[in-house]
Structures are given as structure tokens and as C-alpha cells.
Image (cartoon, rainbow, N blue to C red):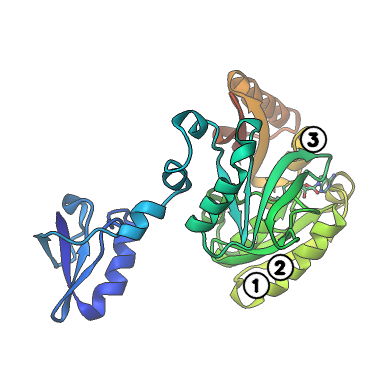
Amino acid sequence: MPALRVPREKAEMTKRLLKRLGIYDGKRRPVREGDHVLLPLLDPDKAPELGFDVLDVELPMRPERQIYRNLESVLREKLSPEEMKYVRRYDIIGDIAVTRIPPELKHRRGEIIEALLKVHPFLKVVAVKGFHRGAFRIRDYSIIWGERRLTTVHRENGVQIKVDLSKVFFNPRMKGERYRLARLVRDGERVLLMFAGVLPYALVIARHRKAEITAVELNEDAVKLGLENIELNRGKLRGRVRLIHGDVFEVVPGLPAFDRVISPTPKGVDALSIALGKAKNWLHYYDFVHEDEIGGFESRILEECRKQGKECRVKVKKVSEYKPRVFKVCADVELS
Ligand code: SAH
């Protein structure tokens, strides 16, 4: 199996590079060889021209990683194949695991908790989640193991995000989407972030770009946490975040236009017109749309652009599956 032979002092750096390129083989262990290290490689053809030798050697497998790499592999030892079909995805938010346990697996609660702890030994709380409710999009949770709390500090994209899941919305699965947007923002941009929550988008953008961000949020608990989060990340932010506590529909009309507007719109709310109205160059508008209606969603945006006398190009992207065939989508709207 392929391995890259690198001088010891360059091993850490090269390992990170290989991981970033997606060609580091985490299932095998690196091995020291005198003043060199052999790094396990997935695909020698994709190995960059680093000037290191690619060898064909047997490196040891990582036993612990193989067994406890994921929840399914732990549970498969305890649950029947029939029961395995009901195992749900889970999220890790800080030191809290959040999952669902369908009725078919109620009797397996203990095994599920145990398996989560095996895969993530740092966990302090395991909770099961209900559905989002109301305009603030807060979920019901019940704690099934560990400390009785739903506050934690989550790490993502180089920032720390304090949340209280009993009082605010937070979705760790959007981290890729937040990074995507952060990379689109240019230094010096003025950005409006509507429905800002505890500020995950704002913080990630400010972490990576020297942007001026104005964020608007109505839920007082989210605003409090948002302000704490600005403090928590103070030293790492390149950009500036200003947070306004208020209703988007009352506050935004009084604001000037922005280079870029981002609207992580709560489900059931229509903020298209107001968001587009404040966008000079770009609008990123999120909504929940059935697969068959994505064309219609696009036309609705084009129609709104026409109404506001703006030239625009729209690209709609599926972000995540909300329920079968219904997607959270993001329309990237370029205005000229
Ligand atoms: N952007 C955040 C939150 C998205 S959820 C994140 O990705 O985590 C939608 C947010 O909009 C919630 O925090 C909710 O409290 C807030 N919200 C709902 N209606 C609002 C309104 N009219 N004005 C301002 N914020 C509102």
C-alpha cells in the first residue's frame, strides 16, 4: 500500500496537506523510519509533486479507529440487521449529542447511548430532539443521559459558538454552507445578515474576511448569546459584527443597502422582497422548496427582480434534505 516518505520535521505539515487534499489514509498509522516518517497515502497518483518518494509498504492498521469509527459499526455488534434500519443520524454540538430514537428502538436506548459515548468519549450530554417550533425555530429536546443542560460551546470553521438549545436555533450541519459563503465574501464588503440567530454565519464570515456585518435577530436569548459569541471570538475576527435586536420586517427598511444580503429565512416566512430590496451585488436567499418546485422558486425570484427594476442572474442550490423531496435551498442571486 502506498506511503509517502518525508523527513520527520516535515511530517506534521505534510500530513495536514495530504488530509486537505483528501489523500491521507486515516485507517493506517504512520510509521517512523530513522529520521523519516512514512505517511499512509490513499492515492499515489494524486500525491502532489512534493519531491518526496512514494513507497509501497505495509503500514499498521489503526484497530481502535476501525472498530469505533462510527456509530453504526459499534451498534452492529449489538443490534439485529432489522433494528439497524431504524438507527438515525445524530449531531454533535459541543459536548452534546443530539439524535432521534424511533419507537422501534425504544428498548435499545441504553445501547445507543453507550455506542455514542464509545465513538465520542468527550460527550457530557445525550439528548433526543423533537421538531422546530414557532418563529424562533426552537426545538424540543429531552436529555436522556448526562448533565441536565442544553448549553454548550460548539467549534466550527475556526470559531466558537455558544448555544442554548432550549432557547435558540442552531444547526451544525450548515457548517459547509457557512464556509462557502465566507469564501464568497470579499474584504471590505458590507454584509447584511437577516435572521442571524446566535451569529454562526456572521462569525464565520468575520473570521475569514475583513467585512462589515450587520446582523438582525428578534429572539432575545439568541441576541444575548450572539453578543457573548462576538466577545468569545474577539481576538480571531478579521471583520466587524454589529448585532441589532429587532424584527427584520421593522428594522431592515430603515437600513441602507448592502453589497451582499444573506437571509437564512425561517421556515414559513417570506422575506424575499425585503432582502432583495437591500442587496446591491449579491443576495443569498434560503427557503424550503419541494424538488418539483425549484423552477417555480427561481421564477419567483426573477419576477421579484423585475418588480424592483433589477437585472439579476439566479442559481439555486440544494443545501440539505428537509424531508423526503423537500429541500432547504439557497438561491444565489447576482445583481447588476
Ligand atoms: N442564521 C441562524 C438562525 C437561523 S433560524 C443560524 O443559521 O443558526 C431563523 C432565525 O430567525 C431564528 O433565530 C429566529 O429567532 C429568527 N427570527 C424569526 N423571525 C424573525 C424576525 N421577524 N426578525 C428577526 N429574526 C427573526
Which is nearer the N-term, disc 1 or disc 3? 1
Residue 203 % position (x, y): 64, 63
Residue 233's label in the rendered image is 1
- Confirm or reject: label 1 Cβ below 8 Å from ligand 1: no
What is the C-alpha distance between the residues marked 1 and 2? Answer: 6 Å
Marks counted in the figure total: 3
Mark 2 = which residue?
Answer: 229
Residue 220 % position (x, y): 87, 57
Mark 3 = which residue?
Answer: 269
**118 left or right of 28?**
right
Residue 128 % position (x, y): 68, 45
- Confirm or reject: label 3 Cβ below 8 Å from ligand 1: yes
What is the C-alpha distance between the residues marked 3 and 2? Answer: 26 Å
Using the rendered image of the protein, determine whether residue 175 is visible from the camera's viewpoint: yes
In the foreground, 142 or 297: 142
* Type of amino acid at the residue the image marks with label 1: Asn
**What is the secondary structure assignment of the residue under circle 1?**
loop
Quadrant position of residue 30: bottom left
**336 left or right of 300?**
left
Q: Is the residue marked by circle 1 packed among few (<14), some (14-19), or many (20+) residues within 10 Å?
A: some
In the foreground, 130 or 227: 130
Residue 276 vs 222, above or below: the answer is above
Q: Quadrant of the N terminus?
A: bottom left
Quadrant position of residue 134: top right
What is the C-alpha distance between the residues marked 1 and 3? Answer: 30 Å
* Type of amino acid at the residue the image marks with label 2: Asn
* Type of amino acid at the residue the image marks with label 3: Val
**What is the secondary structure assignment of the residue under circle 2?**
helix
